[in-house]
Protein backbone atom coordinates (compact mmCIF):
# COMPACT_ATOMS: atom_id res chain seq x y z
CA UNK A 1 0.00 0.00 0.00
CA UNK A 2 2.84 2.34 0.87
CA UNK A 3 4.57 1.64 -2.46
CA UNK A 4 1.38 2.32 -4.39
CA UNK A 5 0.89 5.62 -2.57
CA UNK A 6 4.49 6.66 -3.30
CA UNK A 7 4.10 5.70 -6.96
CA UNK A 8 0.91 7.77 -7.31
CA UNK A 9 2.53 10.81 -5.66
CA UNK A 10 5.56 10.45 -7.93
CA UNK A 11 3.38 10.29 -11.07
CA UNK A 12 1.32 13.32 -10.05
CA UNK A 13 4.47 15.32 -9.32
CA UNK A 14 6.04 14.30 -12.63
CA UNK A 15 2.95 15.33 -14.59
CA UNK A 16 2.78 18.67 -12.77
CA UNK A 17 6.44 19.49 -13.49
CA UNK A 18 6.01 18.38 -17.08
CA UNK A 19 3.05 20.73 -17.59
CA UNK A 20 4.88 23.64 -15.92
CA UNK A 21 7.91 23.11 -18.12
CA UNK A 22 5.76 23.16 -21.26
CA UNK A 23 4.18 26.48 -20.23
CA UNK A 24 7.54 28.21 -19.79
CA UNK A 25 8.40 28.24 -23.50
CA UNK A 26 4.95 28.69 -25.01
CA UNK A 27 5.94 32.02 -26.58
CA UNK A 28 8.93 32.51 -28.86
CA UNK A 29 10.52 35.89 -29.63
CA UNK A 30 12.67 36.40 -32.72
CA UNK A 31 14.08 39.45 -34.46
CA UNK A 32 12.47 40.26 -37.79
CA UNK A 33 14.16 43.54 -38.71
CA UNK A 34 17.33 45.15 -37.40
CA UNK A 35 17.99 48.86 -37.38
CA UNK A 36 19.19 50.16 -40.75
CA UNK A 37 20.38 53.46 -39.30
CA UNK A 38 24.13 54.13 -39.16
CA UNK A 39 25.71 53.60 -35.74
CA UNK A 40 26.19 57.35 -35.37
CA UNK A 41 22.40 58.03 -35.37
CA UNK A 42 20.71 58.73 -32.06
CA UNK A 43 17.67 56.49 -32.70
CA UNK A 44 17.63 52.81 -33.67
CA UNK A 45 14.49 50.70 -34.19
CA UNK A 46 14.29 46.91 -34.02
CA UNK A 47 11.21 44.87 -34.96
CA UNK A 48 10.54 41.57 -33.21
CA UNK A 49 7.99 38.81 -33.74
CA UNK A 50 6.40 36.92 -30.87
CA UNK A 51 4.75 33.58 -31.70
CA UNK A 52 2.34 31.58 -29.57
CA UNK A 53 3.38 27.92 -29.96
CA UNK A 54 0.70 26.58 -27.62
CA UNK A 55 -2.90 25.53 -28.24
CA UNK A 56 -4.46 28.19 -26.00
CA UNK A 57 -4.77 31.95 -25.71
CA UNK A 58 -1.97 33.52 -23.67
CA UNK A 59 -1.79 36.89 -21.98
CA UNK A 60 1.66 38.41 -21.79
CA UNK A 61 3.58 41.62 -21.26
CA UNK A 62 6.86 42.46 -22.98
CA UNK A 63 9.61 43.12 -20.45
CA UNK A 64 12.89 44.89 -21.22
CA UNK A 65 15.68 44.85 -18.68
CA UNK A 66 18.93 46.81 -18.96
CA UNK A 67 21.84 44.46 -18.48
CA UNK A 68 25.60 44.82 -18.33
CA UNK A 69 27.38 44.12 -21.57
CA UNK A 70 30.59 42.12 -21.47
CA UNK A 71 32.29 45.18 -22.90
CA UNK A 72 32.43 48.78 -21.66
CA UNK A 73 28.78 49.72 -20.90
CA UNK A 74 26.61 52.80 -20.94
CA UNK A 75 22.86 53.36 -20.60
CA UNK A 76 20.31 54.34 -23.23
CA UNK A 77 16.55 54.81 -23.07
CA UNK A 78 14.21 52.24 -24.57
CA UNK A 79 10.67 52.72 -25.90
CA UNK A 80 8.04 50.37 -27.30
CA UNK A 81 6.44 51.71 -30.48
CA UNK A 82 3.60 49.25 -31.23
CA UNK A 83 2.54 48.58 -27.66
CA UNK A 84 3.23 49.71 -24.15
CA UNK A 85 5.76 47.93 -21.95
CA UNK A 86 3.14 47.74 -19.17
CA UNK A 87 0.25 46.65 -21.41
CA UNK A 88 -1.12 43.10 -21.13
CA UNK A 89 -1.57 41.63 -24.61
CA UNK A 90 -3.61 38.58 -25.60
CA UNK A 91 -2.31 36.29 -28.36
CA UNK A 92 -4.27 33.44 -29.93
CA UNK A 93 -2.83 29.94 -30.50
CA UNK A 94 -0.39 29.51 -33.41
CA UNK A 95 -0.49 33.28 -34.12
CA UNK A 96 2.41 35.74 -34.41
CA UNK A 97 2.46 39.43 -33.54
CA UNK A 98 5.08 42.09 -34.18
CA UNK A 99 6.39 44.79 -31.89
CA UNK A 100 9.05 47.44 -32.36
CA UNK A 101 11.60 48.59 -29.82
CA UNK A 102 13.26 51.96 -30.25
CA UNK A 103 16.55 52.70 -28.56
CA UNK A 104 17.37 56.38 -28.14
CA UNK A 105 20.72 57.84 -27.18
CA UNK A 106 20.60 61.03 -25.14
CA UNK A 107 23.32 63.65 -24.77
CA UNK A 108 24.63 62.01 -21.57
CA UNK A 109 25.34 58.64 -23.21
CA UNK A 110 29.04 57.82 -23.01
CA UNK A 111 30.60 57.37 -26.45
CA UNK A 112 32.52 54.24 -27.53
CA UNK A 113 30.38 52.05 -25.26
CA UNK A 114 27.73 49.34 -25.58
CA UNK A 115 24.17 49.31 -24.26
CA UNK A 116 22.46 45.96 -23.73
CA UNK A 117 18.86 44.99 -22.95
CA UNK A 118 17.24 41.63 -22.31
CA UNK A 119 13.80 41.23 -23.91
CA UNK A 120 11.27 38.56 -22.97
CA UNK A 121 7.56 37.99 -22.33
CA UNK A 122 6.20 37.55 -18.82
CA UNK A 123 2.84 36.40 -17.49
CA UNK A 124 0.65 38.17 -14.90
CA UNK A 125 2.88 36.82 -12.10
CA UNK A 126 6.10 38.22 -13.64
CA UNK A 127 7.19 34.70 -14.60
CA UNK A 128 9.04 34.46 -17.96
CA UNK A 129 7.02 32.56 -20.57
CA UNK A 130 9.30 33.04 -23.56
CA UNK A 131 12.90 32.86 -24.59
CA UNK A 132 15.11 35.85 -23.72
CA UNK A 133 16.80 37.88 -26.44
CA UNK A 134 19.65 40.30 -25.77
CA UNK A 135 19.72 43.51 -27.78
CA UNK A 136 23.18 45.13 -27.99
CA UNK A 137 23.78 48.59 -29.41
CA UNK A 138 27.18 50.26 -29.88
CA UNK A 139 27.51 54.03 -29.52
CA UNK A 140 30.61 55.16 -31.43
CA UNK A 141 32.59 58.32 -30.93
CA UNK A 142 32.04 60.09 -34.26
CA UNK A 143 35.23 62.11 -33.80
CA UNK A 144 37.15 58.90 -34.43
CA UNK A 145 35.52 58.33 -37.84
CA UNK A 146 37.91 58.67 -40.78
Image (cartoon, rainbow, N blue to C red):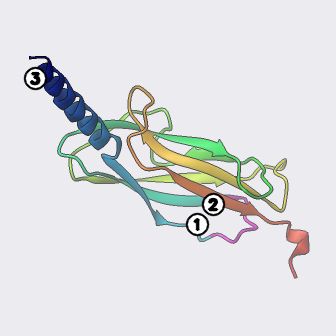
Q: Which residues are drawn in magenta?
A: 37-44
**The residue tagged with tag 3: helix, strand or loop?**
helix
User: Residue reaching furthest right?
Assistant: 143
Q: Which residue is mark 1?
A: 35
The label number, if any, that marks residue 44 in the structure image: 2
* Residue 111 place in picture, x, y as percent: 84, 59
- In this rendering, position of residue 9 left or right of residue 69: left
* Residue 65 place in picture, x, y as percent: 60, 41
Q: Quadrant of the C terminus?
A: bottom right
Q: Which residue is mark 3?
A: 4
Above or below 19: residue 80: below
* Residue 145 place in picture, x, y as percent: 86, 77
Q: At 80% across and 66% down in the image, what residue appears?
A: 140
Q: Quadrant of the N terminus?
A: top left
Q: Give the image quarter of residue 46.
A: bottom right
Q: At 64% across and 53% down in the image, what residue appears?
A: 103
- Determine if the magenta segment contains residue 25: no
Q: At 73% across and 63% down in the image, what residue appears?
A: 138
- Mark 1 is surrounded, within 10 Å at the Cα level, by few (under 14), some (14 to 19) or many (20 or more) other residues, namely some
- In this rendering, position of residue 35 left or right of residue 27: right
- Mark 2 is surrounded, within 10 Å at the Cα level, by few (under 14), some (14 to 19) or many (20 or more) other residues, namely some
Mark 1 and mark 3: span between their CA atoms? Answer: 59 Å
N-terminal label among 1 and 3: 3
- Determine if the magenta segment contains residue 40: yes
Amino acid sequence: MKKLFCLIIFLITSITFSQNKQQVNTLHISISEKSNAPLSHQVHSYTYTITNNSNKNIQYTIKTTPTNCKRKSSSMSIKMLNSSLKKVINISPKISKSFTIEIRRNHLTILDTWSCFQINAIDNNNIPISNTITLSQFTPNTRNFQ
